[in-house]
Image (cartoon, grey):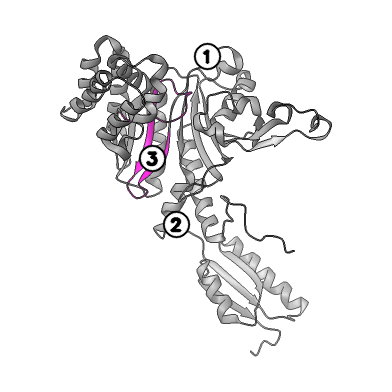
Amino acid sequence: MALSKKPVTGMKDILPEEMQIRDYVISVIKETYGKFGFTSIETPCVENIENLSNKQGGENEKLIFKILKRGEKLNLETAESEKDLVDGGLRYDLTVPLVRFYSNHANELPSPFKALQMGNVWRADRPQRGRYRQFMQCDIDILGEPSNLAEIELILATTTTLGKLGFKNFQIRINERRILKAMAAYSGFPEESYDSVFITLDKMDKIGLSGVEEELIENGFEQECVDKYLALFKGMEASDNGLEYLAGELGEFLEEEVKVSLNEIMESVRATQCSDFELVFDPTLVRGMSYYTGTIFEIAMPEFGGSCGGGGRYDKMVGKFTGNDVPACGFSIGFERIILLLMESGFKVPAQPDKVAYLLEKGLPGNELCKVIARAQEARKEGKQVLVVRMNKNKKFQKEQLTKEGYTEFMEFYKNPLK
């Protein structure tokens, strides 16, 4: 029986054309984030299963690729539960590993610490356009900064990067978890039911206001609470300033500092942005991770028809590891979706060096081969990209393939120089 030549479902091989774009995007990301003071770190792809399944990762905890214990630790005969079989898992995001990393190395790191982390993550998800089971994530996080300077810097760094990659007319949607909770409390929903309410609210863009109302009633909430809740959204639609209207309606249910801080973030970003995007307050933005404690934000791109990244503040997560809370905020670019959009738009990597292919006839004498290689070395010193390769029988097809890879000049070397 022949071995399978296809990758595992939900994972993919990356061809040279895409890899070239990925490498370019990574270089732009690292250069731009570096100018904002972010420094690169790396964490293992495997984490302790307790860290991954601590009820902080929302729905992602149901998608963990779990790793069996090894050697003497694995005893199938005496195992009574999953805990007896599993001790690790592939990371499903980069935030949990970052917080563990920070908790372990805080004394060796500056404060605040601005981290850039890029790497593959794994989720046993249903594959679809722009969504895989193995995919690259790109996160920037600021730990140890309690003020909204963290949010401002994260939004500006992310949008500047997207602008450098040629994206424009996208949206950054912004909200606050404390606003979500204040709206639910004002409407009379029981506190233990907030997550259920938010899950339904998160579907607003798909099912609309009437769909949200129908689902909340189906979930057993009282009509009076639902009506009061939806009236807030209707009032905001009719208002010139949704945040001001909402703060006025919620009154004592919402702390004044929440409105002030959110306004300051939006005003600062709008006044200093250097990319073409719109920053909008969106009270329907929820984001699924339960570790968010304050500001949340998301990238919406019309070309994709959905989210292309997001993040928020998670001030309580470090405390799960150390017992002491540390303010933290992060923003993740949807790297794979960005690559997909660039590929679909026919994006070409700019400012590439000249690409020259030296085609060598089979049987070229050793002394002639040395001359060709020496010539290639000189061209490389001059900044050219030189491919030295044997000539195929079908030279025309070979050149066509190399042209697709960006080679614009071809030099042929024969064992008989008269050819």
Along the viewing direction, whichever of 126 and 257 lies nearer the viewer: 126
Pointer 2 with pointer 1, Cβ within 8 A? no
Along the viewing direction, whichever of 4 and 332 lies nearer the viewer: 4
In magenta segment, residue 292 = yes
Q: Look at label 1 and name its amino acid.
A: Asp
The residue lying at 73 percent from left, 72 percent from top is: 370
Up the image or down, 191 lies above or below 175; here it is: above
Figure quadrant of the N terminus: bottom right
> Does the rendering let one see residue 414?
yes
Pointer 2 with pointer 3, Cβ within 8 A? no
Up the image or down, 336 lies above or below 216; here it is: below
Give the mark nearest the N terminus, 2 or 3.
3
Quadrant position of residue 293? top left
- What element does badge 1 sit on? loop
* Dot 3 alpha-carbon crowd within 10 angstroms: few under 14, some 14 to 19, many 20 or more: many
Residue numbers of the magenta segment: 284-310
Q: CA distance from mark 2 to mark 3?
A: 20 Å
The number of callouts visible is 3
Q: Which residue is mark 2?
A: 343
Which label number is shown at residue 160? 3
Q: CA distance from mark 2 to mark 1?
A: 42 Å
Up the image or down, 293 lies above or below 361; here it is: above
Which label number is shown at residue 36? none
Name the outermost residue toward the bottom: 418
Which label number is shown at residue 325? 1
In magenta segment, residue 186 = no
Q: In this rendering, which labeled residue sits more in front, label 2 or label 3?
A: 2
x and y percentages locating residue 367 in the rendered image? 76, 77
Q: Is residue 297 left or right of residue 92?
A: left
Q: In this rendering, which labeled residue sits more in front, label 3 or label 1?
A: 1
